[in-house]
Image: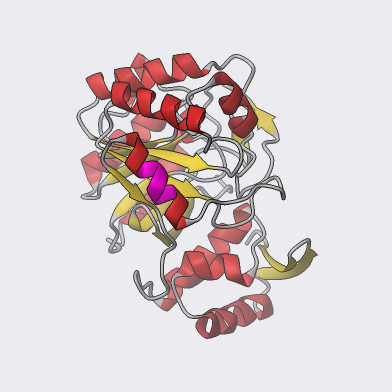
């Protein structure tokens, strides 16, 4: 299988040092979120498929994890909705049976039916998202597949809590002027109290999203909203350079895998790599010289994009 499904490890705001497993083709998703840092969804779908042969996925996982890297999590995430991969349960079971790593899943919550919840039983932590608890807010922020309804998603999250024994960290991504009104916050509060996650994580724009007009909320505004939810919460902040240190080879792999999925500025990459700008500039220059990266002019300045090896 030529398509790389492993990326990182990256210093993650949510998972520490995390090895990413991207099980869907670029921008294959059930949502087309206005804030997505990977860009617009090109294949909007709710159909689960075996996009990549299971044997090839397992082979790539073995090639990396057999080296016994130091990781906090192996995380199902990437450039689309991971649960669209119809064999995600098989992958999760395989990793748990053969390696001693914690598993995490980042999901938009759109497909959490009872059957999928059973598939996800080996996963230690699920990060489901719920950006709005109203149909209007849901459609404005997430721009979902036409078959999806917010009430069904909330019901599925309630069912997740009842039938999943791992940790649930519910993430809410706030967009200024859309889901931070009194009505939206009250609807989210009601949904949270019904879902009963272990913790609610409040997030906002860190890097430019799909739509240029999307504005973030300040840390203080997020904290104020958190208090109104009357639930255990935390505000997600940037990873500081140096908080999670990767070795030089891991930084190179992280830069390569990230820019293979989407072009990035040096500022974008620094927030991912967890190193100083000076260190990163040296690594990027080396990778350009080796033919691994190319330079492109983008709307925000200079971008770096990986070339397939």
Whether residue 196 is visible here, answered yes or no, is yes
Tell me residue 86's x, y (percent): 46, 25
Residue at the image point whose x is 59% and y is 70% from the top: 267
- Residue nearest the viewer, comparing 174 with 303: 174
Residue 280 vs residue 98, the one in the foreground: 280
> Against 89, is 302 above or below?
below
Residue 224 as seen in the image, left or right of residue 103: right
Which residues make up the magenta segment? 222-226
Task: Name the one closer to the observer, 233 or 99.
Answer: 233
Q: Residue at x 26, y 41 (%)?
A: 232
Residue farthest along the front direction in this orientation: 182
Above or below for 243 versus 177? below
In this rendering, the answer to whether 238 lies above or below 133 is: below
Q: Give me the residue at 42% from left, 74% from top.
A: 241
Q: Is residue 225 magenta?
A: yes
Task: Provide residue 244's location: percent of width, then percent of height.
Answer: 34, 69
Q: Position of residue 309 (x, y in %)?
A: 62, 62
Give the residue at x 54% y 57%. 206
Q: Quadrant of the N terminus?
A: top right
Question: What's the magenta bit mostly, secondary-structure-wise?
Answer: helix
- Number of dots carrying numbers: 0
Q: Is residue 59 visible?
A: no
- Residue 182 is left or right of residue 231, and the answer is right
How was the colour assigned to the protein in this rendering?
A: secondary structure
The x and y percentages for residue 15 are 34, 53
Q: Quadrant of residue 291?
A: bottom right
Q: Is residue 21 left or right of residue 104?
A: right
Q: Is residue 171 magenta?
A: no
């Amino acid at each position: 299988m030529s398509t790389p499904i492993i990326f990182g490890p990256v210093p993650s705001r949510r998972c520490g040092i995390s090895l990413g497993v991207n099980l869907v083709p670029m921008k294959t998703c059930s949502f087309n979120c206005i804030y997505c840092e990977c860009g617009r969804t090109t294949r909007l779908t709710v159909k689960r498929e075996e996009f990549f042969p299971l044997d090839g996925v397992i082979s790539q996982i073995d090639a990396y994890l057999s080296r016994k890297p130091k990781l906090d999590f192996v995380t199902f995430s990437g450039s689309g909705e991971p649960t669209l991969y119809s064999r995600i349960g098989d992958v999760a079971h395989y990793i748990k049976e053969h390696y001693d790593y914690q598993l995490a899943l980042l999901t938009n919550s759109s497909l959490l039916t009872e059957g999928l919840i059973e598939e996800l039983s080996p996963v230690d932590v699920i990060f489901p998202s719920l950006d709005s608890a109203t149909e209007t807010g849901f459609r404005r922020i997430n721009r979902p597949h036409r078959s999806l309804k917010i009430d069904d998603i909330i019901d599925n999250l309630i069912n997740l809590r009842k039938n999943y024994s791992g940790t649930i960290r519910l993430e809410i991504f706030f967009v200024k002027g859309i889901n931070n009104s009194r009505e939206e916050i009250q609807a989210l509060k009601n949904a949270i109290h019904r879902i009963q996650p272990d913790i609610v994580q409040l997030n906002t724009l860190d890097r430019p999203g799909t739509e240029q007009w999307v504005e973030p909320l300040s840390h203080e505004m997020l904290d104020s909203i958190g208090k109104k939810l009357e639930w255990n919460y935390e505000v997600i902040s940037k990873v500081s350079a140096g908080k999670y240190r990767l070795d030089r080879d891991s930084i190179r792999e992280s830069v390569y895998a990230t820019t293979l999925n989407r072009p990035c500025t040096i500022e974008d990459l620094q927030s991912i790599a967890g190193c100083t700008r000076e260190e990163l500039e040296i690594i990027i220059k080396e990778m350009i010289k080796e033919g691994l990266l190319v330079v492109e002019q983008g709307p925000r300045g200079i971008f770096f994009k990986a070339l397939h090896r």
